[in-house]
Each structure stands twice: as structure tokens, then as C-alpha cells.
Amino acid sequence: MSSDDTAGAEVPAGLPRPGPNPLPAHPLITRLAQVGQRMRQADRDHPWALDAAVVAGVFLMFCVPDLVHRDGPRELPLTRLPVAGTLAVQAGLLLPLLRRRRTPSVAFAVIAAVFLLQWSLGALLRADVALLVALYSLVLHGRLRHLPWACAATAGALALVAVRVSTAVSVWDALFFLFSTATAAVALGLAVRIRRAQLAGLRERAARLEIERDQRSRLATATERTRVAREMHDIIGHNLSVIITLADAGAYAADVTPERGNQALRLIGDTGRQALGELRRMLGVLREHTGPPELSPQPGIADLDGLCARIRAAGPQIVYRSGGELDALDRGVQLMVYRIVQEALTNTLKHAGPRTRAHVTLTVEGSRLRVRVQDTGPPDGTAQPGPSYEEGHGLAGMKERAALYGGNVTAGPAPGGGWTVEAGLDLTPIPDPSGGLT
């Protein structure tokens, strides 16, 4: 049961409600954690220092008493080694510990061999604790496939010790004590190794989650940039094309029919104000400010009549037909349809000129929405769609918008001349993995 479950469980009457565990916040625990962190940092900076400290500590605690007190237990028939022999055996037991973390298997093998040699001579030394330290280091730092033979070698060596001291202690009692210490060394090494592996896994998972978070942030930024670039292209490109065409027509008509020139100027002003309003709406969402952004509704299918009227004012003849329940479509779908028609008519005005004729058709048949924009091209048939239409942001933006709703867009020359843009969208709701429909 987790701590959250425990906190939310009912406590019988008369029993105290369990409180938070005070150990993690205890000053002693915090101080020990800081000391451990400093020791790990010092070990990373000076890897030999810890091994040398272990050897020095074992020598002071277990070797010095054997050198000072030369008399062993009288009830045990053991051999007393000379000082030189004692120092040699102690060196054979302790010096391999300097390599206990780098080559733990080799260090254990050397110490086990010296241990067997010592007890075959019948000598007892307190430095034999080095065998348990080597076994612990092998479990913690070595390869686990070496652990079975290391345990077998340890069992054989300890059995020899039990036989040697059988005159004073029962063999079974000696084996129980010796095997308990060896088991404790192995268990401690496994516990520390598992804990380190868990911490390493948690650190790796945290690093991976941080990388994924950064990647999601960059992806969201790139997606937002693409969306803003697409909106800017649709708004500025369309309105500038209309303004340029109206300006050219107004300049031509200024000398012949000043009234048409004034009308063109008024249309330019209206188009510019509409473009400015759309830009303010879009940039108002992106700008950081304390109050809520000033929003206006996104254009939809109902605004296509006004779009076609502005294009007609620039010269082209626009025929707009629609069929089906278009007003019931989702607002996002309506915005997609509006932008596709806007981009197609903008390119018609740009590449076919003001004297072309375009047919815009929107139909809903069952669960399928079809959008078709076809122009007749310029009267003389000389103009052709430029690279900005075929490979630039226009066609790519239309395909991206349609792809957001599972649709597709095709564009190409019409058989009888001109250019055709067709878009298809499946209006069937997408099944939700949770069981609903989206």
C-alpha cells in the first residue's frame, strides 16, 4: 500500500492516526546524506583514496593487534608464525584489496589463496577478515557469473577453518558462525548493488524524461511557428494580391473614369483594414499581456461570399456554388475550407490575371466534403503558374491544413486550360481510444 493509500484509509476509533514519516526530514539523516555525497565526490576525484583507506583501516584494526599480542588462544592447536611470516601473510591478505573495485575477481582469488595457505599452516590471523571484504567487493563490483565459484571457494576455505578449530569448538557451530558471516557479506553486497542499479535507473529515466520534455517543447515551438507562418501567408498574401490588382486597375481607370478609380481606392482601404484586423487578431493571441486577448471569430464558410466579392472587385469573374449542410460543419473544418478557397483564388488572381473566370464549388455528400476551385486561365493562355504556387507555401499550406483533418489536396492544370485545385475531406468522426468519438 502506498503512502497516499495509507493517508486516505479509515482509522478505527481509539487508534492514533498515523502521521508523516519523520526520518527523511531528521537532521541526522540529512547530515549523513551530505557526508555520503561528499565521500562519493571525493571518491570520483581520487579513486585510489578509498581503497587505500580501507586497507589502512583493516591494518590498524586487525593486523596491529596480531603484531602486538603474539600469543593466540591456548585451547586451539594453532601455529604461531614469526613476525616476518605474519607480515608476509598480512600483506598477501591486505594488498589485493587495493584492486578490489577494479579487478574484484582477481583480488578475491589472491586473498582466498593466501587464506588457504595460512590455514593449511594452522595459523590464525585477524586479518582473515579481508576474505569477507573481498567477497563483498566481488558481489558489489564484479561479474555475477563469478559469484558461484567465489561462494564455493569461500565455503571450502571456511570448512577448513572449522576443521582446524574443531578441537575447541564444534564443527557445526563453527560452520554456522562462519557461514553466517559470509552470507551477511554476500547479502550486503547484493543489497548495495541492487540499490545502486535502482538509483542509476531512476537517474537515466529522469534524464530521458528531460530530453523528451525538451523535444516536445521544440516540436511544439516548430508546430506553432509553422501555424503562424501559414496564417501570415494566407492573410498577407491574399490581401496584398487583391490590393496590388486593385491599385493597378485604379491607376489605369484614374484617367479614363475617375469614379472607378475612387471605387478602387475605397476597396483597397477596405481590404487593408480587413488584413490589419486579421493580423491584430492573430498577433493578439501571441503577444503577452495581462488582460485577455482581443479575439474575433475565425472566418468560415459563411464568409466565402465576402471573399468572392473582394476577388470580383479586383477583376476576375467568380461563380460560387454550394450544396449540403455546410453551416453544420465544425469551425475548424470551416476555417480550413475558407483558407483553401482563399489561397486558390489568390493564386488565380496572381497567375491568371484579373480577366479570368473561376468556379468555386463546395458540396457535402454523406460523410465526404469536396472543395473545387477551377479557373479558365488568362484570356491569351500565356501565363502559367509560377514556382511560388506549385512548390511554395501556398500549396504546402493547403495540404497541411487538409491533413490536419485527414483530407488531401491536389492541384494541377485543367484539361481545357487554366488551373484546378481540389480538396477532399472525410467527415466521419475518428474513434476515441477511450471508447467515444472525436
Image (cartoon, rainbow, N blue to C red):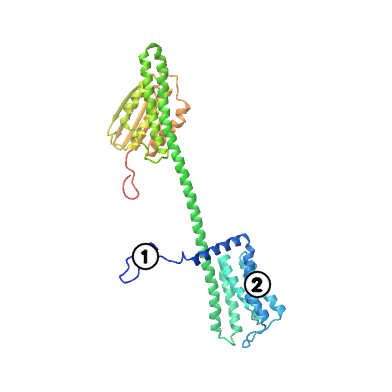
Q: Does 44 appear above or below 437? A: below
Label 1 belongs to which residue?
6
- State which tag comes first along the sequence, 2 or 1: 1
Specify few, some or many for label 1: CA neighbours under 10 Å numbering under 14, 14-19, or 20 or more. few
Q: Nearer the viewer, residue 229 or 138?
A: 229
Q: Is residue 222 visible?
A: yes
Q: Is residue 315 visible?
A: no
The residue drawn where x is 40% and y is 38% is 285
- Inspect the image, locate mark 1, and give the three-letter code of the amino acid beneath it: Thr
Residue 376, quarter of picture: top left
Point out residue 368 in the picture as x, y percentages from the top left corner. 32, 36
Q: Give the CA separation, mark 2 to mark 1.
A: 49 Å
Point out residue 105 in the picture as x, y percentages from the top left corner. 61, 67
**Mark on residue 56?**
none
Q: Does 321 appear above or below 48? A: above
Q: Looking at the figure, which quarter contains the C terminus?
A: top left
Q: Nearer the viewer, residue 388 or 198?
A: 198
Point out residue 280 in the picture as x, y percentages from the top left corner. 39, 33
Secondary element under disc 2, as helix, strand or loop, is helix
The residue sitting at the top extreme is 256
Q: Looking at the figure, which quarter contains the N terminus?
A: bottom left
Point out residue 56 in the picture as x, y percentages from the top left corner. 64, 71
Specify few, some or many for label 2: CA neighbours under 10 Å numbering under 14, 14-19, or 20 or more. many
Q: Does 150 appear above or below 200? A: below
Q: Residue 417 vs residue 109: left or right?
A: left
**Mark on residue 94?**
2
Q: Does 379 appear above or below 162? A: above
- Inspect the image, locate mark 2, and give the three-letter code of the amino acid beneath it: Leu
Q: Residue 140 vs residue 263: left or right?
A: right
Secondary element under disc 1, as helix, strand or loop, is helix
The residue drawn where x is 40% and y is 27% is 238
Q: Are marks 2 and 1 in contact (CB under 8 Å)?
A: no
